[in-house]
Image (cartoon, helix red, strand yellow):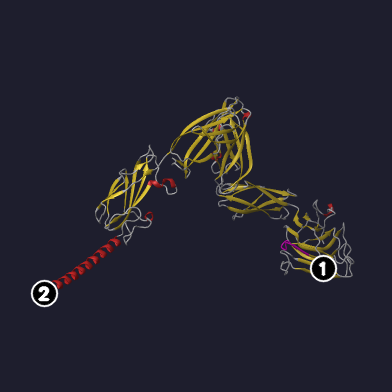
């Protein structure tokens, strides 16, 4: 067997293992070629360290059969015959076979050698405590100057009771002494922009002849220098690889790395939250910047905040002097924008009683690879005023009240719940919790206290609801207090009454094709300040049998009339029960809303019976009843005539008798 130079990793068996562990390992764990040529042989061993009460094993081993060829092997069982081996005789051989196609039934993937053997009575358990004991030795022939694993694909160690012995595993590696590696930039590239590759060599770099690149898009390149660049024209994940050839014809193993290429990379600053109009010199306040990723891959964003020390040049912000005061790193931004948190300590401001703007810059994409570099920065529209004076001040930022419907506040109707919603702003230069008190007609109603608000910050919505049963005007007083300063605001709340609708029609007994007048002039508004401004009529034809349609709202109206007239007319072309709806709107802008129960009086309904009498809400007098009455009258008339005739006949007979007698 030819001699080779073998280097062992520092973590190999020569350094020893912890005495409290059992280790199965390849020795040497790193076979590094120096002066070997194709066709030469070398040997490795598989060993076990620090095993006790050992009685049997099942071990599987594999390699790259295109690089290495099995020549022979020696199993070191039993220890009686092979000093330095394992297990005592007698033993039961179970498996000792080589198959370089890695197709042995029942074996682990990649297994090319399978050794299984166990001691039998009266053999004692094997005790290798604190020692390295060899399981087998194997000789290989090198087929090509490539890299190959020397891998323990599976192993089971058993004690005399048949229980498994826990162990750690260390595989081996066969490789050339000159190894290739490379880096590339940027980490994620963009189509039609170059990726820069830089090769490195472990071992003897002086005899490198070629750097052989494969960019996995159908392009290869052999270079004599380690730095190359390549441009991808389609997005995707590419397995770029490198192999080094030396001047003596040897080649390193192939190393591959995944290169991600996307269509677009783009970070953008969308918004800077409202800044504080004033802040005390030594106070710190928070704010947020919303950062979006408009590209095709998740980006690790670095966001840096600056303040200006010279006047802002809005057309060319780079001409302004900006001072960095805060940065956030390592934020991963995907498809959803993120609000990043910042703080500004006003003590950094060089001058007090002065205004400062904030600039936020989102970085993380290399220069030239960002699709739109202009949207990476944003300057706050509002400045920060840094002051030396501490002031307490709070004001109402937003006040809404009334009946809340679909996030709107409507004029309330008597008996409804009235909701009050208040937002306040800290207008001072100090961190303050704002106290808010609500009075209705001078009486205390409710109070709130906000969380501590930095200067310029607006509170969340403070809400409260109460039913007001009486109509009229209510005086609202809202006191807001910051520190020892109180500001008062007043407002008028109007609670209204509803209209009362009265509808009549004429003639009283309309017939088909006759003009019918609908009259709502008797309607009135119960609120002294209210009046009806809009009348909306909808008229629905009867069903085929003449009865009123059951759900007019789901049917098409025969006629719709809308305006400020309380009297309208229509012509019914057929007999039956016609349904008439009237909905009104008043000068308060209130009309019928189905979900708002208090608006029920804003709509009314009547039934107009055409060709058979009058009917109001609830139905009318059906034409069938009229027909029945006519039939009854006719029957009674016939019966009366028959009775009269009988009486006349009886009377005539008596008169005849009296005449004869006379």
Secondary element at image label 2: helix
Q: Quadrant of the C terminus?
A: bottom left
Please report whichever mark, 2 or 1, sits nearer to the chain's N-terminal start: 1
The answer to whether residue 419 is visible is yes
608 vs 389: above or below: below
Q: What residue does disc 2 label?
A: 661
Q: Is residue 306 left or right of residue 625?
A: right
Q: What residue does disc 1 label?
A: 117
Measuring 50% from the left and 35% from the top, which residue is drawn there?
A: 398
**Location of residue 286 in the rendering, given as x and y in whole percent from the top left corner:** 60, 35
Tell me, yes or no, whether the highlighted magenta stretch contains residue 66: yes
Task: Confirm or deny contact between disc 2 and disc 1 (CB under 8 A).
Answer: no
Closest to the camera, between mark 2 and mark 1, is 2
Give the magenta-colored segment's residue range.
59-67
Q: Is residue 83 left or right of residue 385?
A: right
Tell me, yes or no, whether the highlighted magenta stretch contains residue 405: no
| Of residues 130 and 464, the one drawn nearer to the viewer in this rendering | 464
**Location of residue 495 in the rendering, given as x and y in whole percent from the top left corner:** 44, 38
Secondary element at image label 1: strand
- What crowding class fits label 2: few (fewer than 14 Cα within 10 Å), some (14-19), or many (20 or more)? few
| Of residues 649 and 360, the one drawn nearer to the viewer in this rendering | 649
Measuring 45% from the left and 48% from the top, which residue is drawn there?
A: 595
Measuring 87% from the left and 58% from the top, which residue is drawn there?
A: 129
Residue situated furthest front in the rendering:
662
Q: Quadrant of residue 300?
A: top right
Q: Quadrant of the N terminus?
A: bottom right
| Of residues 75 and 179, the one drawn nearer to the viewer in this rendering | 75
**Location of residue 48 in the rendering, given as x and y in whole percent from the top left corner:** 83, 60
- What crowding class fits label 1: few (fewer than 14 Cα within 10 Å), some (14-19), or many (20 or more)? some
């Amino acid at each position: 067997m030819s001699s080779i130079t073998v280097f062992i990793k520092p973590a190999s068996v020569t350094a020893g293992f912890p005495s409290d562990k059992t280790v199965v390992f390849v020795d040497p764990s790193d076979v590094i070629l120096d002066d070997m040529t194709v066709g030469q042989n070398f040997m490795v061993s598989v060993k076990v360290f620090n095993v006790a009460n050992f009685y049997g094993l099942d071990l599987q081993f594999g390699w790259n059969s295109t690089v290495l060829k099995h020549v022979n092997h020696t199993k070191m069982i039993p220890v009686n015959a092979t000093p330095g081996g394992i297990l005592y005789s007698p033993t039961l051989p179970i498996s000792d076979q080589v198959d370089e196609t890695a197709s042995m039934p029942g074996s682990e993937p990649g297994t090319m050698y399978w050794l299984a053997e166990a001691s039998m009575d009266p053999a004692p358990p094997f005790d290798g405590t604190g020692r390295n004991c060899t399981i087998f030795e194997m000789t290989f022939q090198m087929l090509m100057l490539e890299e190959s694993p020397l891998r323990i694909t599976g192993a089971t160690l058993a004690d005399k009771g048949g229980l498994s012995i826990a162990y750690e595993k260390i595989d081996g590696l066969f490789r050339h002494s000159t190894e290739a590696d490379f880096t590339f930039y940027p980490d994620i590239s963009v189509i039609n922009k170059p990726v820069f590759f830089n090769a490195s060599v472990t071992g003897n770099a002086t005899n490198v002849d070629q750097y052989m690149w494969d960019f996995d898009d159908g392009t290869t390149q052999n270079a004599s220098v380690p730095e190359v660049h390549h441009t991808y024209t389609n997005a995707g994940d590419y397995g770029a690889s490198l192999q080094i050839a030396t001047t003596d014809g040897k080649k390193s193993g192939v190393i591959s790395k995944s290169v991600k290429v996307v269509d677009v990379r783009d970070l953008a600053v969308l918004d800077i939250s409202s800044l504080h109009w004033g802040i005390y010199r030594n106070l710190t306040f928070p704010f947020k910047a919303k950062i979006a990723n408009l590209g095709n891959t998740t980006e690790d964003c670095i966001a840096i905040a600056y303040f200006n020390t010279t006047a802002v040049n809005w057309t060319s912000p780079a001409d302004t002097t900006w001072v960095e005061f805060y940065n956030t790193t390592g934020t991963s931004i995907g498809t959803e924008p993120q609000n990043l948190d910042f703080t500004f300590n006003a003590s950094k401001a060089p001058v007090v009683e002065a205004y400062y703007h904030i600039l936020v810059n989102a970085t993380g994409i290399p220069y030239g690879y960002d699709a739109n570099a202009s949207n990476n920065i944003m300057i706050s529209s509002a400045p920060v005023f840094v002051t030396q004076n501490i002031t307490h001040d709070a004001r109402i930022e937003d006040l809404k009240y009334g009946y809340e419907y679909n996030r709107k506040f409507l004029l309330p109707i008597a008996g409804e719940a009235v909701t009050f919603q208040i937002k306040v702003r800290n207008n001072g230069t100090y961190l303050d919790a704002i106290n808010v008190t609500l009075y209705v007609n001078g009486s205390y109603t409710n109070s709130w206290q906000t969380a501590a608000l930095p200067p310029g910050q607006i509170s969340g919505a403070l809400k409260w609801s109460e039913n007001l049963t009486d109509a009229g005007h209510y005086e609202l007083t809202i006191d807001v207090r910051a520190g020892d300063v109180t500001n008062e605001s007043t407002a008028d709340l109007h609670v209204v009454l509803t209209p009362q609708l009265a509808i009549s029609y004429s003639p009283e007994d309309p017939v088909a094709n006759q003009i019918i007048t609908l009259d709502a002039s008797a309607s009135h508004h119960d609120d002294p300040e209210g009046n009806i401004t809009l009348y909306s009529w909808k008229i629905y034809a009867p069903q085929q049998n003449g009865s009123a349609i059951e759900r007019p709202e789901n049917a098409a109206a025969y006629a719709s009339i809308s305006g400020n007239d309380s009297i309208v007319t229509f012509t019914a072309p057929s007999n039956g029960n016609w349904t008439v709806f009237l909905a009104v709107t008043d000068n308060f802008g209130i009309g019928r809303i189905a979900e708002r129960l208090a608006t029920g009086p804003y709509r009314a309904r009547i039934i107009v019976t055409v060709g058979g009498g009058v009917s109001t809400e609830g139905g009318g007098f059906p034409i069938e009843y009229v027909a029945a009455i006519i039939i009854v009258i006719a029957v009674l008339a016939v019966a009366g005539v028959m009775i009269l005739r009988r009486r006349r006949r009886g009377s005539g007979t008596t008169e005849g008798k009296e005449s004869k007698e006379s």
